[in-house]
Amino acid sequence: MEVTDLAAQIRKEHKKGPARRFRQSGLVPAVFYGRSAENILLTVKNDELIRLHKDKKDHAFIKLIIDDGSAKKIEKLSLIKELQVQPLTGKLYHADFYEVDEKRKITMDVSLRFIGKAIGVENGGELQHIKREVKVSCLPLNLPDHIDVDVTALDIGDSIKIRDLKIAEGITVLDRPDTAVAAVQVVKVAKIEEPAKEVAAEEGAAAVEGEAPAAGAAASADKDKEKEKEKGK
């Protein structure tokens, strides 16, 4: 997993007034905490946090380079636990950094990256992505950015399950082994039915056409009767 450095400074003031002034000067109030660490009040640059968010690194490991005023800076490996945003302005309001112990396993969701073109798609099937990520447990520095899933060999009716994934040593996938992550299915073609109004109109027209000959026959019979009366006279 990629680790991104982020500069931070110790702050001694933690009330609303100083926090407002920090934000006005382009800094975001933050806190670092963890199981074995005492809370450390910090400020980080607003622009740097926005950059991390745009580069989609706000869910990756962050190495805080903390300036406490001494010659030697403090380094802390962390994850952004919470990033508060002001609802009206959209500006960053506060950041929580959680300590990561490099010797202690963590549980995280890792995205799946599908590669290749499935044979079944070329044969008229449709590739379905059933899962987009899996839950894994491992040491922090073993955590992968993603897990590749090669779908090239999938034909219509085939699927790839959790147990089929190629997982690096030291990583345990916590999802059920028989859970499917991708499959190729037959493309279903929907049957188009004629609207009820059009069917009713066609039936009505057929009925009218069927009545016309009957009406004509009745009229012809009436004329024959009149001719017979004339002959009798």
Image: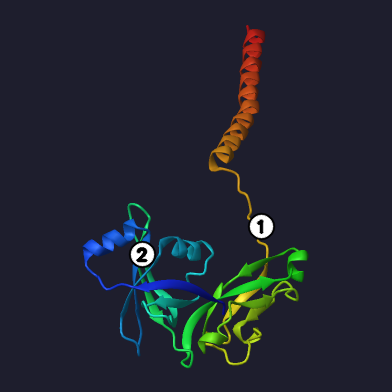
Quadrant position of residue 195? top right
In-image side of 119 versus 27 (left or right): right
Specify the amino acid type for callout 2.
Val
Tag 2 secondary structure: strand
Type of amino acid at the residue the image marks with label 1? Val
Tell me the mark number nearer the camera, choosing from 1 and 2.
2
Q: Residue at x 65, y 85 (%)?
A: 164
Where is residue 60 shown, x and y percent of the image? 50, 75
Image location (x, y in percent) of residue 181:
60, 76
x%, y% of residue 63? 48, 78
Q: Which residue is mark 1?
A: 189
Secondary structure at badge 1 equals: loop
Give whichever of 89, 168 is nearer the camera.
89
- Disc 2 target residue: 28
Of pointers 1 and 2, the one earlier in the residue sequence: 2
The extreme front residue here reads 71
Going 59% across and 30% down the picture, which residue do you hit? 208
